[in-house]
Image (spheres, rainbow, N blue to C red):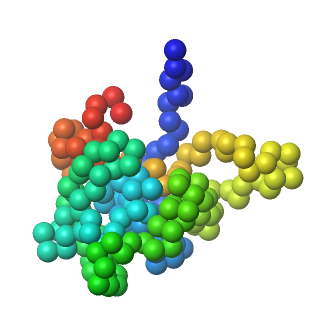
Amino acid sequence: LLKRREQSKRRPFSMGELKKILNVASEEWRGMILTGLYTGLRLGDVASLTWANIDLQNQQLSVATRKTGRNQILPIADPLLRHLETLEAGENPQQPLFPKACRQYDNGGHNGSLSKEFYQILVSAGLAQPRASTATGKGSSVRHAQNALSFHCLRHTATSLLKNAGVSDVVARDIIGHNSSAI
């Protein structure tokens, strides 16, 4: 039997926290954060987006999520659209939206280094404490304790924003990519 994971301690970001994060984030991270916030996509999916995923004219983003393989067509909210319109698209539709993050994700095959970078943004924003050094005897291979705040919290924030806007649970789950109301 598989043990069920403990209930996640993750929570949505407040608007004040989001402002702090966006104020200290680099331009690329600002775009990734806005994308996560307005689409509910996971970090690896955001890092892997290319211009081929974006339809600015119809204000849609299409993606096959890596975790579930689910094909999604998501509306692009106006604040995200305004940000995307400032980015250099180039000639190649396979060019990543977030080149540095895409290289990091592709090189490692996972988002560990990106998660650490986001954690440093949280530290810079005053929303997290610096992690203890490896002098504690716990090397970097030891799994870090679950933090209340992480990039994944943007999925929770997106869900909360949708529900607060009066979007039905079924539509909110479809946009975020949840198959069940239990999630």
Give the left or right position of residue 90, taking residue 147 as reference: left
State the residue in front, 127 or 26: 26
- The residue under the point 34% across, 50% down is 65
The image position of residue 18, as x and y in percent, is: 44, 63
- The residue under the point 23% across, 51% down is 72
The image position of residue 15, as x and y in percent, is: 40, 60
Q: Quadrant of residue 59?
A: bottom left
Can you see residue 168? yes
The C terminus sits in image quarter? top left
Give the left or right position of residue 115, taking residue 140 as reference: left
Give the left or right position of residue 120, taking residue 50 as reference: right
Residue 180's place in the image compared with 58, above or below, is: above
Residue 113's place in the image compared with 72, above or below, is: below
Looking at this rendering, what residue extends furthest in the left direction? Answer: 58
State the residue in front, 160 or 73: 73
- The residue under the point 28% across, 31% down is 180
The image position of residue 172, as x and y in percent, is: 23, 45
Give the left or right position of residue 132, taking residue 120 as reference: right
Residue 85's place in the image compared with 181, above or below, is: below
Can you see residue 23? no
Q: Quadrant of residue 6?
A: top right
Residue 6's place in the image compared with 79, above or below, is: above
- The residue under the point 72% across, 43% down is 142
Instruction: Give the total number of marks visible in the rendering.
Output: 0
The image position of residue 169, as x and y in percent, is: 21, 38
